[in-house]
């Protein structure tokens, strides 16, 4: 499925245009690039959390936004599972209630069944009654993921999923996320500005800079044939740090 | 003693009625002002807040213009129902409502606005309607501010004097609330009654402010 954003933000961001297009199959897509390249903005625009002043957003066949024809599908109808960088768990709800709330009918027996399944899948049974402030970083992330999945999204957007967890558990979480994507079989798009992480996670790597896609492809294709000198430099440093990169 | 009891009962009736109305209208207005952009927003904001700085007698004067038997709203109401808010406890409640409303709107609006935007946005991505998000996320997280706003409004309503006098008068047993009874007792030289009433009001108001402060100070995190 093609993801295409050709949008412009005038008022909110002091004139920033985002003109990107990339492929997202049932795989892990990593958006990589420097801060301010438009990665998070891509997520927010796809999820309907920011409204561009003009342009068009397409997801496969679906037109999500078009300023000319006045199309702007509301955020709650976009069926994305969005994992915020700091998870945005509701502080006044237990882990269990956080997840349950995301069900279209939180009080129904189906919700209870799905809740149990998710708690089990994410190993959260024992902390289900705890409030977010009592959970570890890794547990919070699993609650947030379970909550995102409770609404049965058609694709997952993860904004820097590893930035808020300890280095020690990152490796495990990478493996878990990969496993999760294979199980769910929906596109999982994640943002990082850590090259090692990008290379370790990506089936398909999309390199952003200044609101454009500089290069996209499999990590190995990009490493072998970098589009410009900046990417070549990254590729070089990735090879230097090869042990870290290819140890996954 | 009879004056004291009847004044206290009346004050409670007037202040509670005003507070209930403030709870509904004030919360709605606070939410609207916190999250919506619309034409005339600043004007509405100013209109709600102006009783904070106007002398209550001026507020009362406007209320009489509006709700008096010949008033813009009161006129049609009187012709329709043969009822007028002037010189009734409902008039006193109306005065308390207008004067105390800005406290509720300001305090609860600040609480609503301080709810983390990420929590509201994530709700939208979870497919939740604005109503669901308001009810299950925004209001629970802002509830201390909302309660504090209600308490402050109640305290202000309880102490209302000027606007009440203008629209409801000072009729013993009918519209003589605690503050008005204090004035009457003092004028009549009944110092004991004035003192008792003053002490009673001070204790109630002090307690309310104390709890309002405590509730705004405690937080979830």
Image (cartoon, grey):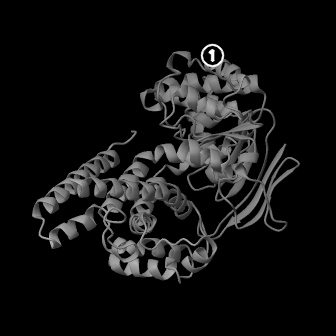
Relative to A142, residue B78 above or below: below
Q: Which residue is mark 1?
A: A120
Q: Give residue B209's position: percent from left, percent from top.
A: 27, 53
Q: Is residue A232 visible?
A: no
Viewer-proximal residue, A16 or B71? B71
Tell me the residue at 71%/45% (across/down).
A206
Residue drawn at (51%, 47%) of the image: B139
Q: How many numbered discs?
A: 1
Q: Quadrant of residue B75?
A: bottom right
Q: Residues within 10 Å of mark 1 (few under 14, many from 20)?
A: few
Please give the name of the residue rendered at 62% of the width and 50% of the height, measured from the top-left corner: A40
Where residue A171 appears, as percent x and y from the top left, is: 55, 24
The quadrant of the picture occupied by the N terminus of chain A is top right
Q: Is residue B168 above or below residue A143?
A: below
- Quarter assignment of residue B94: bottom left
* Residue A108 appears in view: yes
Q: Is residue B179 left or right of residue A156?
A: left
Please give left or right for residue B53 compared with residue B76 in the image: left
Tell which of B181 and A149 is nearer to you: B181
Q: Residue at x 21, y 70 (%)?
A: B183
Report the quarter where the C terminus of chain A lies.
top right
């Amino acid at each position: 499925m093609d993801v295409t954003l050709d949008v412009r933000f005038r008022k909110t961001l002091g004139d920033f245009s985002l003109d990107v297009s990339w492929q997202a199959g049932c795989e892990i897509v990593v958006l990589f690039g420097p801060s301010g390249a438009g990665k998070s903005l891509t997520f927010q625009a796809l999820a309907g959390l920011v409204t561009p002043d003009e342009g068009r957003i397409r997801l496969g066949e679906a037109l999500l936004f078009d300023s000319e024809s006045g199309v702007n599908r509301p955020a709650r109808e976009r069926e994305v599972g969005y994992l915020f960088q700091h998870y945005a768990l509701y502080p006044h709800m237990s882990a269990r209630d956080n997840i349950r709330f995301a069900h279209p009918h939180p009080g129904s027996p189906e919700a209870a069944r799905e809740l149990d399944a998710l708690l089990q899948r994410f190993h959260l049974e024992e902390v289900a009654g705890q409030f977010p402030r009592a959970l570890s970083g890794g547990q919070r992330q699993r609650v947030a993921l379970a909550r995102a999945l409770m609404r049965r999204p058609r694709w997952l957007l993860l904004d820097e999923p590893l930035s808020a967890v300890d280095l020690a558990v990152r490796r495990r979480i990478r493996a878990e996320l990969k496993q999760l994507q294979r199980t769910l079989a929906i596109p999982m798009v994640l943002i990082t500005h850590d090259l090692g992480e990008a290379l370790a996670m990506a089936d398909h790597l999309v390199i952003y800079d200044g609101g454009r896609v500089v290069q996209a492809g499999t990590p190995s294709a990009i490493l072998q044939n970098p589009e410009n000198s900046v990417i070549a430099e990254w590729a070089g440093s990735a090879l230097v740090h090869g042990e870290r990169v290819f140890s996954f | 003693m009879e004056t004291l009891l009847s004044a206290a009962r009346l004050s409670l009736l007037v202040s509670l009625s005003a507070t209930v109305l403030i709870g509904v209208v004030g919360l709605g207005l606070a939410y609207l002002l916190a999250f919506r952009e619309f034409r005339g927003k600043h004007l509405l904001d100013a209109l709600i807040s102006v009783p904070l700085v106007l002398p209550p007698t001026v507020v009362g004067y406007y209320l009489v213009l509006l709700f008096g038997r010949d008033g813009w709203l009161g006129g049609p109401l009187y012709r329709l129902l043969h009822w007028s808010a002037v010189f009734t406890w409902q008039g006193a409640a109306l005065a308390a409502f207008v004067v105390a409303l800005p406290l509720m709107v300001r305090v609860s609006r600040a609480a609503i606005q301080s709810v983390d935007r990420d929590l509201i946005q994530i709700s939208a991505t979870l497919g939740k309607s604005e109503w669901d998000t308001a009810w299950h996320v925004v209001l629970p997280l802002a509830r201390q501010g909302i309660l504090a706003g209600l308490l402050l409004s109640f305290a202000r309503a309880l102490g209302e004097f000027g606007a009440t006098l203008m629209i409801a008068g000072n009729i013993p047993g009918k519209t003589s609330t605690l503050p008005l009874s204090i004035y009457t007792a003092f004028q009549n030289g009944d110092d004991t009654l004035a003192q008792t009433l003053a002490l009673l009001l001070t204790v109630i108001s002090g307690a309310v402010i104390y709890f309002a402060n405590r509730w705004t100070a405690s937080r979830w995190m």
